[in-house]
Image (cartoon, helix red, strand yellow):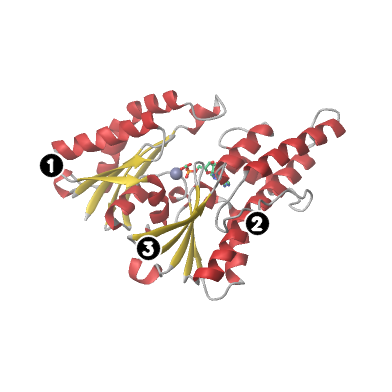
Amino acid sequence: MHILAIETSCDETAAAVVVDGCQVLSNVIASQADLHALTGGVVPEVASREHVRQLPWIYKKALTEANLDWEQIDAVAATETPGLIGSLLVGIQTARTLAEVHNKPYIAVNHIYGHIFSNWLERKPDQDIKFPLLSLTVSGGHTNLYLITSPREIKLLGSTKDDAAGEAFDKVAKLMDLPYPGGPEISKLAVNGDPMRFKLPVAQLDQPYDFSFSGLKTAVLYLLQDLKVQNDGTLPEKLKADLAASFEHTVAKTLAGVCRKAIAEFNPKQVHLAGGVAANSKLRKVLEEAVSTSGNIDLLWPAKMTYCTDNAAMIASAAYFN
Ligand code: KG4
Ligand code: ZN
């Protein structure tokens, strides 16, 4: 089954063609990151207008790169929720119109389920995906932990009570005067920093599988203010790197701690990491340690970096499996 999918929930205009939920024939993405860097974050109105400009050629390119015409497309899918409503509407209406005009079924997809199924892309489901599995989906808008017993049995175990993990990266980056999106910037700075230099708080919540990052963000804010006072109003590069590394380490430790508890209770065969923050190498390393000490469990993250951040191939995959 060939599915053409469209993704416009935030600041990436994307279209892709995927066969049977796994084989990616094309995956076209126009990022608006440079545009939103000018304002230090996504301006919804600007994002919607940019989707209107980009989507007509993006979906045609996805078809051309897949070397297919409309007769060979079996269904059209689009991200329907969650996301910025103006941005979503551009993708939904385009996909519905294409489905109507070409007489194909239309499939509405939940964006977070898209991130979950990014781990199916370029994999052989029978061999590579093993149930039950835990999926930790960490993006700019969401931090969710799921227990998945089959592609259609997905249970939410817990989620963030305030900021998402990616949002925390973006907000801390802003406090440190780093450009948007902040995750990759913090990650780059952290390479030369000492992750043990500053002890930052790990939230303890009543529900074992929930997350919270707003306290951590506030702790960074106060620490930054103190450090600036101690250094004549500026922040030396070494301290900046140490702060970035300590923050990144604390986020990774927080996420890994919750996963460890879920592994002990649900005994999964695999743990999947997905979403924009899954691109973070420190998080991958810390999770790898947590998973390896918990027994014979595989840790999977998307087969390509481009499948971590927003893309339409994952939307086509979720459409197929659901
Ligand atoms: O999944 P995604 O593209 O969009 C949402 O659905 O939100 O995730 C974007 C988020 C941003 O917050 C960005 O800062 C973060 O993912 N991100 C990273 C890295 N790359 C992207 N965070 C930490 N380390 C990275 N290497
Ligand atoms: Zn996303």
Task: For the C terminus, give its image quadrant.
Answer: bottom left
Q: Which residue carries the number 1 mark?
A: 103
Task: Classify the position of ligand 2 by quadrant: top left, top right, bottom left or bottom right.
Answer: top left
The x and y percentages for residue 180 are 57, 33
The three-letter code of the residue at mark 1 reads Asn
Picture quadrant where residue 20 is located: bottom left
Q: Earlier in the sequence, mark 3 or mark 1?
A: 1
N-terminal-most mark, 3 or 2? 3
Q: Residue at x 38, y 51 (%)?
A: 113
- Disc 2 is placed on an element classified as helix
Q: Which residue sits at x=67%, y=40%? A: 217
Q: Residue at x 37, y 57 (%)?
A: 121
Question: Element at badge 3?
Answer: loop
- Identify the amino acid type marked 3: Arg
Q: CA distance from mark 2 to mark 1?
A: 49 Å
Between label 2 and label 1, give the one nearer the viewer: 2
- If you read the primary sequence from the N terminus, does the residue marked by circle 2 or circle 1 appear first? 1
Q: Is residue 121 above or below residue 35?
A: below
| Residue wearing tag 2 | 253
Q: Secondary structure at mark 1?
A: loop
The residue that mark 3 highlights is 123
Q: Quadrant of the N terminus?
A: bottom left
